[in-house]
Image (cartoon, grey):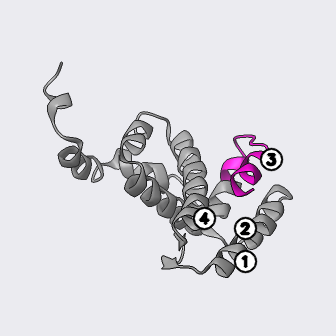
């Protein structure tokens, strides 16, 4: 085993995140709003799935972004229901607010699959990834229902 593998990831990550390899994942994009959306979902992945986040480092940039999009959406829905927390606005929600958010999310998801643009940063990133990766609409709906 190499000495590099013995270095704790918590020490290695800050160094890696200063490299052009790390920055290029998001900086490859031309659209500033998409850059912000992908950065938001990458931060969600980094915070909530540390080992999973590390594993994405070995993928090409477009696949990393796709992973961030899917994980960001799944984590958003999971936190909404399980923790009563909106990861976009970073606030706690009541049960009625959660129901409203889920209904709104379903409507926006319909728009995304119909080719329309939405303001939700998680779904706008997900929509961008759908251009490359064909994900059945039923799969995210299963998470909600």
User: How far apart are labels 1 and 3 at the CA level?
Assistant: 20 Å
Residue 29 placement (x, y as % from top left)? 55, 56
Secondary structure under the numbered disc 2 in the rendered image: helix
Within 10 Å of the Cα at label 4, are there few (<14), some (14-19), or many (20+) other Cα atoms? Answer: some
Task: For mark 4, give the secondary structure.
Answer: helix
Query: Which of the two discs, 3 and 2, labels the residue nearer the N terminus?
Result: 2
Question: Are the two marked residues, 3 and 4, in contact with CB atoms closer than 8 angstroms?
Answer: no
| Residue lying at 42% horizontally and 60% vertically, measured from the top left | 43
Q: Mark 2: few, some, or many residues within 10 Å (few <14, many ≥20)?
A: some
Q: Left or right of 114: which side holds 145? A: left
Would you name the residue on which mark 3 appears?
Answer: 138
Instruction: Pick out the residue farthest to the left.
Output: 3
Q: Which residue is mark 1?
A: 100
Q: Quadrant of the N terminus?
A: top left
Task: State the residue in front, 25 or 66.
Answer: 66
- Give, as a single range, the part of the protein colored magenta: 128-145
Which label lies toward us, 3 or 4?
4
Residue 55 sits above or below residue 143 on the image: above
Choose the circle earlier in sequence order: 1 or 2: 1
Mark 1, other Cα within 10 Å: few <14 / some 14–19 / many ≥20: few
Is 102 part of what is drawn in magenta? no
Left or right, 6 with respect to 133, comes to: left
Residue 130's place in the image compared with 93, above or below, is above
Report the residue marked by disc 2. Answer: 105
Q: Position of residue 34 (x, y in %)?
A: 59, 63
Q: Assess whether mark 3 and mark 1 are in contact (beta carbons under 8 angstroms).
A: no
Quickly name the residue at label 4: 81
């Amino acid at each position: 085993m190499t000495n590099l593998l013995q270095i704790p990831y918590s020490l290695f990550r800050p160094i890696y995140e200063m490299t052009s390899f790390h920055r290029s994942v998001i900086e490859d994009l031309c659209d500033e709003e998409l850059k912000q959306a992908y950065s938001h979902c990458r931060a969600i992945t980094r915070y909530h799935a540390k080992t999973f986040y590390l594993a994405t480092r070995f993928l090409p940039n477009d696949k990393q972004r796709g992973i961030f999009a899917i994980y960001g959406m799944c984590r958003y829905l999971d936190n909404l229901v399980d923790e009563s927390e909106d990861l976009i606005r970073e606030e706690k929600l009541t049960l009625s607010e959660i129901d409203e958010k889920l209904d709104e999310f379903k409507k926006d998801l319909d728009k995304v699959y119909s080719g329309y643009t939405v303001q939700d940063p998680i779904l706008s990133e997900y929509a961008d990834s759908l251009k490359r990766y064909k994900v059945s609409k039923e799969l995210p709906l299963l998470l909600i229902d």
